[in-house]
Image (cartoon, rainbow, N blue to C red):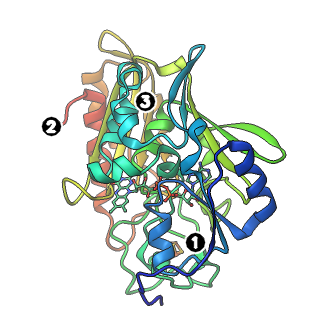
Amino acid sequence: MAIIRDGMAPFDLYQPTSIEDALSLANRLGADAWVLAGGLDSLERFKDRIKRPKAVIDLGNIDELRGVRREGEDLVIGSMTTLTEVSLHPEIRARFALLAEAAGEVASPQIRNQGTIGGNISQDTRCWYYRGGWDCYRAGGGTCYAGESLEGQNREHAIFGAEGCVAVTPSDTAPALVALEARLVIRNAGGRREVAVDDYFVGPGSDITRLNVLKAGDLLTEIRLPATWAGATFYFEKVHDRPVWDFPLVNIATAMHLSGERIDRSRFVLGAVAARPWRLPRVEAAVAGSLRNAVADSASRIAAEGAVPLKNNGYKMALARNLVKRAILGKRES
Ligand SMILES: Cc1cc2nc3c(=O)[nH]c(=O)nc-3n(C[C@H](O)[C@H](O)[C@H](O)COP(=O)(O)OP(=O)(O)OC[C@H]3O[C@@H](n4cnc5c(N)ncnc54)[C@H](O)[C@@H]3O)c2cc1C
Ligand code: SF4
């Protein structure tokens, strides 16, 4: 187990001022380099000495990674745009209020001023065994202390999609981006690729050591919001122990296209219930073509189908059902 020293091991710090320079550094340094955005997740791990990179590439001086712009119908958000900017940006609020609300629910104003949208969706899990330096599966070891040990504490852990590891994504903005069918631009020295947000996040069945597809040499440069869900009916709610400065126990992000009160199409996504944002396709199918009031009870009952609760987190199933019901009705209180 780690001894918390609150002092970082030394590393070489690189502060490029262009994407091209950052890509060339990332290519040259490979797995020795750590990409630094707002540093809120990264510096905690360095200070705990759980992560000891030889080199750090700080993206903070690359202006072209910041800001929000329109490209045709797409809204393009630079990966280094802060959560505060995302939550307050007029066009995000007007067309994609779901994302603005989710970003505005992260932690506290200070953290939103420093944390970036790229870092928020790429942050690592908060599982305390893993973050404390225990040699679990995710850290390359041979057990899962949260899920397999009889004494394991797993109140905040997964109810869906666990294979070996029962850790969850702690991001508030990731479920919103999945609901909005965002596309993410990843660049490396070899070129540029654009991935659907559903393919950005990784569950333990695909790779138990990471929560997203980024590999050494990769930079996440842009988040693109297509017009598909612009101006739809949105719902975001986060359940957490404390009103500020706290990660979600469960959150929900939904987008619905309505004709009057009838739901034509929808995306329902839960967060903090699996290693990746967890879509609910059965709920989406159940509500399609129905009136909100008429379908809320029956659709919410299937929200936790397939869930496998652990010793301490069965309450997440009830939360999932209630959040789905409230999202369908668009009301915080049912
Ligand atoms: C006390 C506290 C409370 C918090 N509460 C919440 C909460 O309630 N909800 C929530 O969603 N979050 C919460 N967070 C997380 C916080 O909001 C940050 O968004 C998050 O820690 C990472 O953002 P960052 O910009 O600081 O990224 P960093 O810490 O710098 O990076 C995070 C990870 O992403 C990688 N990365 C970042 N940007 C890129 C890029 N462009 N290309 C490639 N890799 C990249 C880094 O290498 C690193 O692995 C909390 C954090 C703290 C410290
Ligand atoms: S839940 Fe995952 S990260 Fe946590 S102890 Fe188990 S294997 Fe490690």
Q: Residue at point 40% right, 17% down?
A: 231
Please state the horizontal and vertical placement of residue 201, each as a whole percent of the image: 59, 50
Please state the horizontal and vertical placement of residue 174, each as a whole percent of the image: 47, 44
Instruction: From the image, state whether disc 3 or disc 2 is nearer to you.
Output: 2
In the shown orientation, is residue 205 left or right of residue 28?
A: left
Q: Residue at point 51% right, 52% down?
A: 119
Instruction: From the viewer's side, name the closer residue of 128 and 89.
Output: 89
Q: Which mark is residue 164?
A: 1
The reply to whether residue 302 is visible in this rendering is no
Q: Quadrant of the C terminus?
A: top left
Instruction: From the viewer's side, name the closer residue of 253 and 221.
Output: 221
Please state the horizontal and vertical placement of residue 93, each as a whole percent of the image: 35, 24
Q: Which mark is residue 273?
A: none
Q: Residue at point 72% right, 70% down?
A: 32
Label 3 vs 2, first from the N-terminus: 3
Residue under circle 3? 286
Q: Which secondary structure lies at badge 2?
A: loop
Q: Label 3 to label 2, Cα distance in Å?
A: 22 Å
